[in-house]
Image (spheres, rainbow, N blue to C red):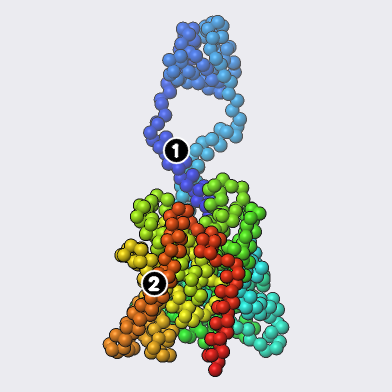
């Protein structure tokens, strides 16, 4: 702010100087003629003069035509006495405006000095400003390698304090990090026991799961300086800049004492060496080498801790992960239904909610959502409520926001023809009916033929319980549900449309993974293919085939076998319940949206039937476990 004020003053002075010079050269002073006192008396009698300004013995005269002149009166007499001596009539003198100017002694010499010194002073300030800017430019060359880390917490940027209470779920991760907080608060307790707290803590997890938020919560709980920087801020096109910034960051943190250094998106600077462009001599690898050296340079009583976050641990250099560097890894998972409900409660704290809000239902409808996704759902619900000029957020807004986040906004301008609407209705009815019939599939939450995003319609399924693993039977049921729309179109209209293309891609990909990754085919417990790619591009772009052409042919045959099995399963259900398929499709054509209650009533599912179905699934799982144990 001070620098901005100084620059403003300097620029203002420059403009004043330039304007003074322009006024001096563009408007030269007029020549003022000098009158004798006799001529002045004659002009007064002829009523040519409008005003006379008296400054001691000097007279400044203004004529009625606008011209100016100057004269002098007698030294020891007043103006009226001097003019009377030269024959000026009192009546003529009374018509003239006379102004007496009192000039003090200071202004006699101060005025000329100001007008002579002020331009010189302005020029001096201008030159000083130019020299200072050139000096700053030279210093910026040395500041280029200084760290760009932002300091939060103690003595840092004013920001709302974040604690573990602001992070919903992640109980195991918070328990791991409580040791770090305790060490930062009471380092002597650990040092007396000869314990060495981990120098680096690596937070692993998918995007949006809350890695950065949890790191800030550690700093908030410990109440220590928090230096935050992104991995991409180290790397520049100039050689040595990244390494210099790493040194500057660790030096600055050391001066602050007990502190946390947080490096977000560590994979931007910590990727495997020797795998990118430039061999082992590019700028990124030099930056990584310096980071490794700095982390090795921690002393035994050092109270700095490095936190880092990444969602790509597979591409990190092995030297970063060895003991003594990032030797503690904390894994953050996607929240389960209980954690999702807690996340929603946190994001709804300062929002006006209606009485019909059911956050549990919202959590049930959002399996696989991260914390960032749930925050987006709450925000979209608030936007929808504000758009409708409501004073509170209703449950309807939350449900619409889920659909918007999943698939995109409603395409109200995309009006389907009667034929397209009928095809879409039978397609979605096929998905819903197969999913409802198969025991291993997920129950239906909502069926719609209103276009959203790229989809002409959609069927929303919600799992009965949170699962981390899936069986071959469940995968086959999922493929059958995906092919339900395709089979319904073929069964009803005798041909298929392009609307099933995405379902076919997903079913084919799942079938190929069953064979090549999960070992669920007739090949037995074996996986095929090794993913590899250029690390600097950030993802695998090719697959190394570690099998023969003959095996590739057998793999394709096995994939086709799974697809055909799923298609037969879907066809069997739809042919057996053809009338129910027609009933669901006609209801969709009429109402366009079927929620769970309306759909279950239409299909004829009762609460008792649902309980029996859930019990049957549990019994089958118990039987499978017993057989596998034998």
Which residue is labeled 1 in the image? 20
- Residue placed most toward the observer, 6 or 505: 505
Task: Answer with mark 1 or mark 2, whichever residue precedes in sequence.
Answer: 1
| Residue 571: image tag | 2
Q: Position of residue 207 (x, y in %)?
A: 50, 70
Image quadrant assignment for residue 504: bottom left
Q: Is residue 382 visible?
A: yes
- What residue is at 40 percent from the left and 80 percent from the top? 513
Residue 562 higher or lower than 547, as above or below: above
Horizontal placement of 182 versus 499: left or right?
Answer: right
Disc 2 secondary structure class: helix
Percent of width and height locating residue 433: 46, 67
Q: Which mark is residue 332?
A: none
**Between 190 and 134, which is closer to the camera in this rendering?**
190
From this viewpoint, is residue 281 visible? no
Q: The C terminus is located in which quarter?
A: bottom right
């Amino acid at each position: 702010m001070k620098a901005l004020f100084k620059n403003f003053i300097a620029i203002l002075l420059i403009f004043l100087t330039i304007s003074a010079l322009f006024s001096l050269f563009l408007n030269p002073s007029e020549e003022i003629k000098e009158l004798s006192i006799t001529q002045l008396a004659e002009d007064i009698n002829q009523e040519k003069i409008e005003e006379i300004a008296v400054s001691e013995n000097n007279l400044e005269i203004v004529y009625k035509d606008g011209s100016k002149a100057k004269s002098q009166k007698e030294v020891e007499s007043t103006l009226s006495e001097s003019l009377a001596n030269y024959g000026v009539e009192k009546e003529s003198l009374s018509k003239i405006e006379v102004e007496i100017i009192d000039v003090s002694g200071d202004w006699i010499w101060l005025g000329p000095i100001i007008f002579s010194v002020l331009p010189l002073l302005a020029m001096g300030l201008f030159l000083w400003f130019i020299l200072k800017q050139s000096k700053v430019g030279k210093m910026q060359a040395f500041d280029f390698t200084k760290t760009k880390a932002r300091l939060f917490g103690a003595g840092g940027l004013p920001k709302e304090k974040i604690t573990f209470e602001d992070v919903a779920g992640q109980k195991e991760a918070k328990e791991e990090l409580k040791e770090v907080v305790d060490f930062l608060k009471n380092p002597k307790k650990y040092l007396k026991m000869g314990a060495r707290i981990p120098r680096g803590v690596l937070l692993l997890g998918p995007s949006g799961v809350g890695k950065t938020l949890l790191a800030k919560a550690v700093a908030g709980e410990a109440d220590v300086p928090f230096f935050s920087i992104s991995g991409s801020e180290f790397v520049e096109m100039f050689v040595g800049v990244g390494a210099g910034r790493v040194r500057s960051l660790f030096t600055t943190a050391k001066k602050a004492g007990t502190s946390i250094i947080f490096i977000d998106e560590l994979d931007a600077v910590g990727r495997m060496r020797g795998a990118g462009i430039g061999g082992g001599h590019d700028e990124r690898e030099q930056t990584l080498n310096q980071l490794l050296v700095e982390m090795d340079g921690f002393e035994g009583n050092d109270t700095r801790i490095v936190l880092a976050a990444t969602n790509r641990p597979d591409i990190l250099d092995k030297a970063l992960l060895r003991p003594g560097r990032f030797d503690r890894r904390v894994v953050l998972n996607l929240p389960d239904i209980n954690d999702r409900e807690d996340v929603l409660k946190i994001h709804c704290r300062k929002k006006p909610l209606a009485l019909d809000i059911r956050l549990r239902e919202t959590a049930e409808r959002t399996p696989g959502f991260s914390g960032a996704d749930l925050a987006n759902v709450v925000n979209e619900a608030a936007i929808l409520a504000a758009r409708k000029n409501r004073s509170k957020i209703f449950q309807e807004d939350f449900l619409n926001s889920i659909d918007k986040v999943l698939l995109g906004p409603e395409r109200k301008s995309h009006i389907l023809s009667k034929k397209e609407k009928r095809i879409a209705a039978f397609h979605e009815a096929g998905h819903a009916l197969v999913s409802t019939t198969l025991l291993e599939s997920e129950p239906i939450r909502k069926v719609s033929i209103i276009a959203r995003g790229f989809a002409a319609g959609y069927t929303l399924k919600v799992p009965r319980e949170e699962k981390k693993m899936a069986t071959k039977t469940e995968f086959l049921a999922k493929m059958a549900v995906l092919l339900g729309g395709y089979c319904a179109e073929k069964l009803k209209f005798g041909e298929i449309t392009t609307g099933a293309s995405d379902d076919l891609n997903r079913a084919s990909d799942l079938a190929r993974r069953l064979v090549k990754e999960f070992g669920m085919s007739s090949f037995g417990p074996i996986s095929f293919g090794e993913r590899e790619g250029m690390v600097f591009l950030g993802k695998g772009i090719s697959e190394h085939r570690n099998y023969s052409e003959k095996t590739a042919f057998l793999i394709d045959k096995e994939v086709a076998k799974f697809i055909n099995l799923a298609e037969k399963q879907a066809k069997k259900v739809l042919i057996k319940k053809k009338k129910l398929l027609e009933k669901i499709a006609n209801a969709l054509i009429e109402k366009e949206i079927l929620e769970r209650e309306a759909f279950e009533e239409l299909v004829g599912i009762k609460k008792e039937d649902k309980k029996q179905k859930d019990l049957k699934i549990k019994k089958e799982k118990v039987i499978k476990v017993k057989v596998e144990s034998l």
